[in-house]
Image (spheres, rainbow, N blue to C red):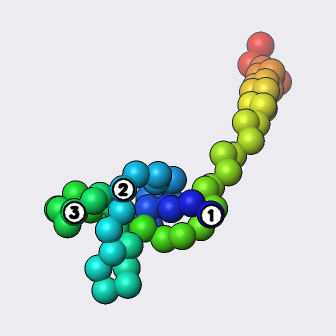
């Protein structure tokens, strides 16, 4: 199991500290600390092949124009 930043879902492997049973990033309490949750790191999404563009239909000339 790894630490994950709660709001962004990014994996975190640095120092931590605990306040009131909640784990935060960083070794000390700072304004930059983020709440952590214990879980597995998110797996990257598979790369998908882009679909080919559709060809535009050929324009037909109106019959009434000579």
Q: Residues within 10 Å of mark 3 (few under 14, many from 20)?
A: few
Where in the figure is residue 18, as x and y percent of width and height?
A: 33, 75
Residue topped by disc 1: 1
Q: Is residue 39 above or below residue 47?
A: below
| Mark 3 or mark 1: whose residue is earlier in sequence | 1
Q: Residues within 10 Å of mark 1 (few under 14, many from 20)?
A: few
Residue placed farthest to the top in the image? 66
Which disc number belongs to residue 15? 2
Residue placed farthest to the bottom in the image? 20
Q: Residue at x 42, y 68 (%)?
A: 36
Q: Residue at x 78, y 31 (%)?
A: 49
Q: Nearer the viewer, residue 44 or 36?
A: 36
Residue topped by disc 3: 28
| Mark 2 or mark 3: whose residue is earlier in sequence | 2
**Residue 62 in view, yes or no:** no
Q: Is residue 46 above or below residue 1?
A: above
Number of marks in the rendered image: 3
For the residue labelled by badge 3, is the local secondary structure a helix, a strand or a loop? loop
Which disc number belongs to residue 12? none
Q: Residues within 10 Å of mark 2 (few under 14, many from 20)?
A: few
Q: Residue at x 50, y 62 (%)?
A: 3
Q: The C terminus lies in which quarter of the figure? A: top right
Q: Residue at x 17, y 62 (%)?
A: 31
Q: The N terminus lies in which quarter of the figure? A: bottom right
**Residue 25 in view, yes or no:** yes
Where in the figure is residue 5, as x and y percent of width and height?
A: 44, 61
């Amino acid at each position: 199991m790894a630490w994950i930043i709660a709001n962004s879902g990014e994996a975190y492997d640095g120092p931590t500290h605990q306040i009131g049973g909640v784990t935060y990033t960083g070794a000390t309490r700072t304004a930059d600390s983020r709440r952590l949750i214990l879980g597995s790191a998110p797996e990257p999404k598979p790369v998908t092949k882009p679909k080919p563009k559709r060809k535009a239909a050929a324009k037909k000339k109106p019959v009434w124009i000579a």
